[in-house]
Amino acid sequence: MLSLLKRWGAWIVVALGILTACDDSFDLTLDIRQTELINTVYTDTLTLRTNVQYLDSIQTNNFILVGSTADAEVGTLRAESFFKVLLPRDTLRFTVAGNNTVIFDSLVLILDYNYQYGDTTVAQTIVVNRLTASPDTARNYYSFERMPFGEELGRFTYRLPRNRASMRIRMSDAFARDLISKEGRPELLNQTNFEQYFKGLRIAAEGPDNAAIFGFDLIQSRMSLFYRNNAADTVSKSHSFYFYNPARDALNQIILRDGSAFARLNADFSKGRLFANLPAKRSIPTQQVGNFGYVHSGMGIATRIEIPHLQTLQKPNKRILINRALLSFNPSARNFEAAGKVNAPPPATVLLGISDRNGRIVRNASGIPIFVPDERNPNVRLERNYVEAGRTYPDLDITTYVQRLLDGKTPNNGMLLMSLLNTAPGNLLIVGDQNAVVPAERMRLKLFYTELSQ
């Protein structure tokens, strides 16, 4: 018995070292005597209270999305985008030394794809407008915002062709010629002057709801002006006006500077069968929608998960140590039904935001969302990637988070199971709650804990 207790004591010391390494403020000071018994308990029946939650403030900086898509259950989503256009270089010129001839060929908006969601065979009319105010590089933009716009510069009826890397939209010849005419004038002297002349672009789609949403690469997409300086030239010259200037940070990671782009996302829940009243109510218990939770980043849908009876684990003269807490769930079979789900797989990545008492994600003083941290590194948010081969997500280890709830160090307002716009603008996750009809689809909190005498 004595050797057994020694082994248990050594294990507890190791466990405490792991937990305290994850959070310097996490205090577990234990006084374990060899005469005390340590009782380890497992449960997966602790109540989880779940709600479908509407998040009305999705940050959409650094996105260009356009199009529309429909889901019979959750409704329709339309996307339009607003972005600055950058002068290729200071004192931009089209003429060459000894030749003032400029023969205009075309002005084309070239948008390189990085995302497609929905029925890409349905035609949409893509419309390009000139902004009348520039997006502010220094601020954050959210899905409900938009910029003022005016003159139409391009219009193109479009469906996705096979083996096409980009969407190409011919733009106004009159605007292009006016742009060329500014050579040698203040408008093409530098970026500041250029923005006074040309505030940026808005791109939107007209057409049916049941089409597709397209996302575009901010670094590669551009507006290109093609021209020649000699009628005999067989190859055009060009200047490309990009939307961001890529640079690299101290870790050699690409960052985006100078430009500003954001997307406006308009979700219409009234066109789906489940969530017509969700924006007004902000949350709906999963029991009222068939015992299912939903996650859809573009429409601002998350599933809020609370552990309301966690404190019932506490007992007089006992100290509860959470050894492991695993949140376990899988996409429901409904995620893979043919009707309306062919192009809506589960999100590539899910994570857990910290909820406030109103169901909104908690933000720090700088406005940055706060997520449940990874157990291995508290400076990294906890994420899990979808495993397509098994139609599953690995369990989410929330051990330290649950311990902090139990100790009263974190408010027990719940977690928001969600995806981020950059991993899934339109993908949909349907997940069974704790009382789902199919047992294998039920969400569970798998809890291993130890009762220590105080």
Image (cartoon, rainbow, N blue to C red):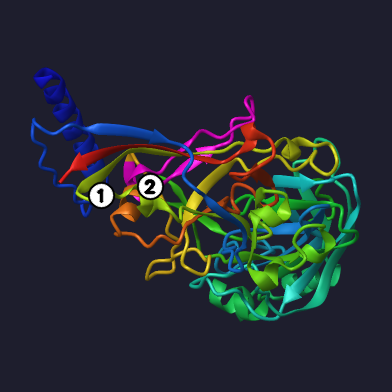
Q: Secondary structure at mark 1?
A: loop
165 left or right of 48? right
Give the labeled residue for mark 1: 23
The quadrant holding residue 450 is top left
Q: Where residue 380 is drawn, which disc sits there?
A: 2
| Residue drawn where x is 60% and y is 57% of the image | 51
Residue 399 x %, y %: 36, 42
Residue 259 x %, y %: 56, 65
Q: Amino acid at mark 1?
A: Asp
Q: Secondary structure at mark 2?
A: strand
- Residue 60, magenta (yes or no): no
Residue 322 x %, y %: 31, 41
- Residue lying at the far front in this picture: please name it: 316
Q: In the rendered image of this protein, does residue 149 appear above or below residue 347?
A: below
The quadrant holding residue 271 is bottom right
Tally the numbered discs. Answer: 2
User: How far apart in space, not on screen, are marks 2 and 1 (Cα)?
Assistant: 12 Å
> Which quadrant of the rendered structure holds the N terminus?
top left
- Residue 385, magenta (yes or no): yes
| Residue drawn where x is 43% and y is 53% of the image | 309
Q: Where residue 78 is drawn, which disc sits there?
A: none
Residue 169 x %, y %: 82, 57
What are the residue bounds of the magenta stretch? 377-401
171 left or right of 453? right
Q: In the rendered image of this protein, does residue 327 appear above or below residue 232?
A: above
Q: Earlier in the sequence, mark 2 or mark 1?
A: 1
Q: Nearer the viewer, residue 110 or 328?
A: 328
In this rendering, which labeled residue sits more in front, label 2 or label 1? 1
Q: Amino acid at mark 2?
A: Val
Q: In this view of the protein, can residue 237 be seen by the observer? A: no
Q: Nearer the viewer, residue 139 or 29?
A: 29
